[in-house]
Image: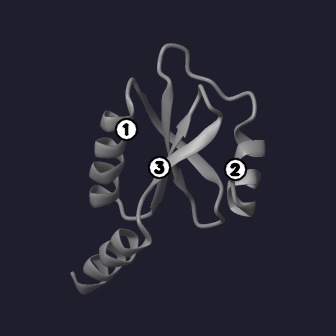
Amino acid sequence: MANRDQLGILRYLEGFSVKGAPYDIFRKDLLGTPVWMEAVQDIETAKLRMMELSGRSPGEYFVFSQETQEIVSNTPLRLFEFAVQFRASL
């Protein structure tokens, strides 16, 4: 079940679609607005790419399923906090 933040994102994503790729990866900007990053074919690839992207550019990422119209995965808060702390220490 979607929480309040997810409902806002789902309204924002309504009508958004990339043909042929059932999973979309998004990053939330500083205002919490989803920014589309890329589309992939399967959930395993989506999770891997989400982690790779968050490693290169720390932030909050999530995977949106075109089939279910739900957020099916997101970066753990701990990973996001770790990435921010690591970047600050450089």
Q: Residue furthest left?
A: 90
What label does residue 9 carry, if any?
Answer: 2
Tell me the residue at 37%/75% (across/down): 78
Q: Label 1, label 2: how many angstroms apart (C-alpha)?
A: 18 Å
Q: Quadrant of residue 80?
A: bottom left
Tell me the residue at 28%/57% (across/down): 56
Q: In which quarter of the image is residue 41?
A: top left
Considering only vertical position in the picture, is 16 above or below 5?
Answer: above
Q: Label 3, label 2: how many angstroms apart (C-alpha)?
A: 14 Å
Tell me the residue at 34%/69% (across/down): 79
Q: How many marks?
A: 3
The residue type indicated by label 3 comes to Ser
Q: State if disc 3 and disc 1 touch (CB < 8 Å).
A: yes
Q: Which residue lies furthest to the bottom in this view?
A: 89
Image position, residue 82 (x, y; %): 31, 77
What label does residue 8 carry, if any?
Answer: none
The residue type indicated by label 1 comes to Ala
Is 73 left or right of 4, judged from the image as shown? Answer: left
Is 46 left or right of 31, judged from the image as shown? Answer: left
Is 82 left or right of 73, judged from the image as shown? Answer: left
Q: What element carries label 1?
A: helix
Nearer to the camera, 15 or 22: 22
The residue at which mark 3 appears reads as: 73
Q: State if disc 2 and disc 1 touch (CB < 8 Å).
A: no
Q: Nearer the viewer, mark 3 or mark 2?
A: 3
Image position, residue 20 (x, y; %): 49, 13
Q: In which quarter of the image is residue 18?
A: top right
The residue at which mark 1 appears reads as: 46
Counting residues from the N terminus, which is met first, the one under dot 3 or under dot 2?
2
Q: Which residue lies furthest to the top in this view?
A: 20
The residue type indicated by label 2 comes to Ile
